[in-house]
Image: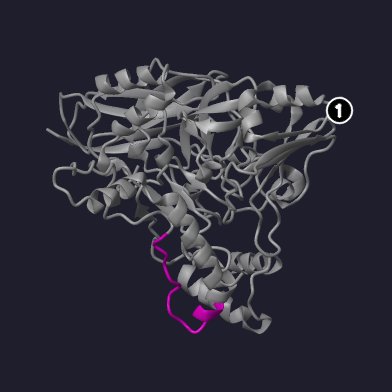
Amino acid sequence: MKNTPEGVDALSIDRRRFLALAGVAAVVPGAALAAVTDSIPVARRRMLQRNGYAIDAETPLDALSTYLTPNDLFFVRHHWNPQYAGHKGWFLTIDGEVERPLRLTAQDLRRLPRTTVTCVLQCAGNGRGLYQPFVPGVQWKYGAVGNARWTGVRVRDLLEQAGLKRAGHHLHTFGSDKPPVRTPPFHRSVEIEKIMADAIVADEMNGEPLPALHGGPARLVVPGWAGEHWTKWLERLSVAAESQKGFYMETAYRYPKVIGAPGVAVPPAETRPVTELFVKSNVTEAPPRARVGSAALLRGFAFSGTPDVARVEISDDDGQSWQPADLDPQHDPWAWRLWSFRWSPKTAGRRTLFVRATDSAGAVQPREAAWNPSGYLYNGWHSASIEVDA
Amino acid sequence: MRRGTALSVVALTLAALLVSPTDASARRARKKKSPARSRPAAAPSFDPRLPILGTKLAEFPPGPAKAVADQACLACHSVDIVAQQRLTEKQWGAELTKMAGWGADFPADRREELLGYLVKNFGPDAAPWEPVVTRPTGR
């Protein structure tokens, strides 16, 4: 972590207060949002605009210090200027390979059995700006990621109500945002197995109606999978035998099957779709200075495309040895896990502390992220630089 | 959609979506003239000197091809997404071909001039680009 605008400044969150607030979050989501928002100091409550229009903005790392990321600090990624439908006149169509096509209003959706999922949403390109050689695209660094409580209706329930046919293997998803001129539409699809397992149509975020900036009235939530699957301003779900075609399926959001040399193009036939997130951890808070013999407190988050993080470790000797960080007790499948670490420096001078995470399937965060031509899923070790006084 | 129309749409959208409730409550508080009825306005939850997201829009740097870049790029997106790239001539050439296919409006006989302008200003050796620090997004 360098001394950039995304860098981390001095600690100021009271841990006991945070844990108390996080406890409230478990039972009263709406109240918890305000409380969690309050726990982030005013000086940290800001966004980093990476595109004025269509809007792209990421969250500074030091504002990602709470279990739930407040809605107004959650990263925004728009492909183009959306037309905000609002709830009046909005409906969701479910058609294709189903026995009984459905057309649901926002009110219809709210009458169906509700479910809540707390999980990470990360843009596939988060960290693109950290790859070398340079990769074209939005130059996200650390903050195109957040953890939120998404509430809505299981897509499985909707498809069962509509009568899913055996021929249906992919769910094509359509939002109301329309591309300008001849830009290809943002049409995506998700395998039906993943959809039936845990996807939801969410119309609430952290206990509030889903904000229009985040896809309201409703968006898809696909736990553990990168953001391009989480279609915003959702207006149609269509079951089909084949996956969707077009630029945003066949050219964009693809990852090499075999990692090649940095800077070398990869033919489309040798790529696969980006789906599950890679195991990753970041430092959100670290003191710029410390003193030999006194403990310095570091904090951060860790997550993966598998349901949980098994451990987070810190190294102060360039990765030769690792010490375990404390994991916060609060966690949900595919949510991020907050961690903290008390470091006792033994020698003076500028020191670099690295963090790495290991997920519940045993995947270990690598020192260097695997370079790929579109700059997806960056997950190299993150670090904090601390000046230690004698 | 030309640049003026695009900017109007963006400005209206942002005004509707991004003005924080805190701004609205502050305006209401200012309208109240009776000291007996006035209450201290709630402290904003952000630095009010920061711009609203999407309202601070950079301009392309000066040069003979600036007008071509304005016309080609700004109907669909702001300068930011161009200015943060650090691409070689080959990479910029590929971007221009892609964008022309998607409808970017520039005369074919000024393509080379536009390419040179992009490489000169946003090539591999250009100075680092920094994002605009803004307020939170509002609810």
Q: Is residue A168 above or below residue A42?
A: above
* Quadrant position of residue A59: top left
Quadrant where the C terminus of chain A lies?
Answer: top left
> For residue A242, which quarter of the picture?
top right
Query: Relative to the observer, which residue lies in front, A264 or A216?
Result: A216
Q: Position of residue A120 (x, y in %)?
A: 51, 30
Q: Is residue A153 left or right of residue B44?
A: right
Image quarter of the N terminus of chain A: top left
Asked if one can make out residue B26 in the rendered structure from this viewpoint, the answer is yes
Instruction: Count numbered badges in the picture.
Output: 1
Circle 1: is it few (<14), some (14-19), or many (20+) Cα within 10 Å?
some
Q: Is residue A4 visible?
A: no
Q: Work out whether residue A365 or residue A242 is closer to the camera in this orientation and state it.
A: A242
Secondary structure state at the residue bearing disc 1: loop
Compared with residue A263, is residue A293 higher up or lower down, i.e. above or below?
above
Instruction: Give the camera-side residue of A14 and B117.
Output: A14
Residue B62 magenta-highlighted: yes
Task: Describe residue A144's horizontal placement relative to residue A81 as left or right.
Answer: left
| B80 or A176: nearer the viewer | A176
Residue A181 found in image quarter: bottom right
- Seen at 46% across and 35% down, the residue is A146
Above or below residue A375? Residue A334 is above
> What residue sits 60% from the left and 50% below the top?
A374
Q: Check disc 1 and report the residue beneath it.
A: A99
Q: Which residues are magenta?
A: B55-68
Is B63 colored magenta in this rendering? yes
Find the residue positioned furthest to the left.
Answer: A390
Chain containing the residue with disc 1? A
Which percent across, then down, holds residue A338?
39, 24
- x and y percent of residue A57 in the render? 45, 49
SS majority, magenta: loop
What residue type is disc 1 on? Glu
